[in-house]
């Protein structure tokens, strides 16, 4: 929690309570349905919560923004972002039902009314959104193929609508595979911890 307060010092009491509750909730559910690797559960706030919130260092979503989190797994980056942006609507999808069960239970326990969790493949969704977010689900080229037509053209945020993709390591080969314009944000510019040295947000505008 100290990490969250360090980088997001203006949280409300409610948000602090929700972020603080994540540790116990994920330990409880992870013991039943493995959504976070066992060695990572002790680093939940750094490797999962703060990593997800890296997107919030790139953009402050305006109220009413609609966001699709593809391959959310245990709820990342969607749940931390939903806590941070309570007036923004999040649709969290994953093809694995037991992961969506964890997301549903944790969202309910936190009282997140701005989260809808659904077992679905993104290719089968008929709705569109302002932004698609995701965390290292697959290589960027096929991912963009899945979501290209899921994004509205018009939006009210400072960044144009598009994709915000969290990933680490050397991205040069993957980025060479895509035809789209993009911008890379290094999370080491925002967070001091060594974990973030190679972590990035790739922004691909619509």
Image: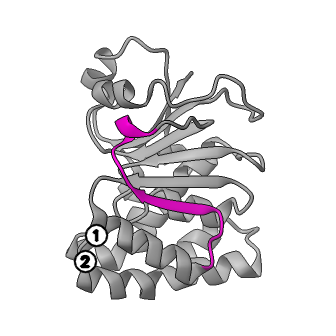
Query: Relative to 104, is 75 above or below?
Result: above
Check the image and report above or below for 131 versus 45: above
Q: How many marks?
A: 2
Q: Position of residue 127 (x, y in %)?
A: 54, 38
Which mark, by number, is residue 33?
2
Residue in the foreground of this view, choosing between 66 and 42: 66
Q: Is residue 62 above or below residue 3?
A: above
Q: Nearer the viewer, residue 42 or 106?
A: 106
Query: Which residue lies at the image location 58% right of the left edge and 54% below the top edge?
Result: 90
Give the percent coordinates (x, y) of residue 187: 49, 46
Secondary structure under the numbered disc 2 in the rendered image? loop
Residue labelled with disc 1: 98
State which tag comes first along the sequence, 2 or 1.
2
Q: Which residues are magenta?
A: 111-125
Residue 173 located left or right of residue 20: left
The residue sitting at 54% across, 83% down in the picture is 109
Residue contact at pointers 2 and 1, CB within 8 angstroms: yes
Q: Within 10 Å of the Cα at label 1, are there few (<14), some (14-19), or many (20+) other Cα atoms?
A: some
Q: Is residue 107 visible?
A: yes
Find residue 158 and name its label. none
Q: Residue furthest top?
A: 179
Which residue is depicted at the point 41% across and 64% down? 48
Where, quadrant-wise, is the N terminus in this rendering? bottom right
Q: Is residue 182 above or below residue 122?
A: above
The quarter holding residue 42 reads bottom left
Q: Callout 1: helix, strand or loop? A: helix
Name the residue rendered at 37%, 72% in the picture.
101
Q: Is residue 61 magenta?
A: no
């Amino acid at each position: 929690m100290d990490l969250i307060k360090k980088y997001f010092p203006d949280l409300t009491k409610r948000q602090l309570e929700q972020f603080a509750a994540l540790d116990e909730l994920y330990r409880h559910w992870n013991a039943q349905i493995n959504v976070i690797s066992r060695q990572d559960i002790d680093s939940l706030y750094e490797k999962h919560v703060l990593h997800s919130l890296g997107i919030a260092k790139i953009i402050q979503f305006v109220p009413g923004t609609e966001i699709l989190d593809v391959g959310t797994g245990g709820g990342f980056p969607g749940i931390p972002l939903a806590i941070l942006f309570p007036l923004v609507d999040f649709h969290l999808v994953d093809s694995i039902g037991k992961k969506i069960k964890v997301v549903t239970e944790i969202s309910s326990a936190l009282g997140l009314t701005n989260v809808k969790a659904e077992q679905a493949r993104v290719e089968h969704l008929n709705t569109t959104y302002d932004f698609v977010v995701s965390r290292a689900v697959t290589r960027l080229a096929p991912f963009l193929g899945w979501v290209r037509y899921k994004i509205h053209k018009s939006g009210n945020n400072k960044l144009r609508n598009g994709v915000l993709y969290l990933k680490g390591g050397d991205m040069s080969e993957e980025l060479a595979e895509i035809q789209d314009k993009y911008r890379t944000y290094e999370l080491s510019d925002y967070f001091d911890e060594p974990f973030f040295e190679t972590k990035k947000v790739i922004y691909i505008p619509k």
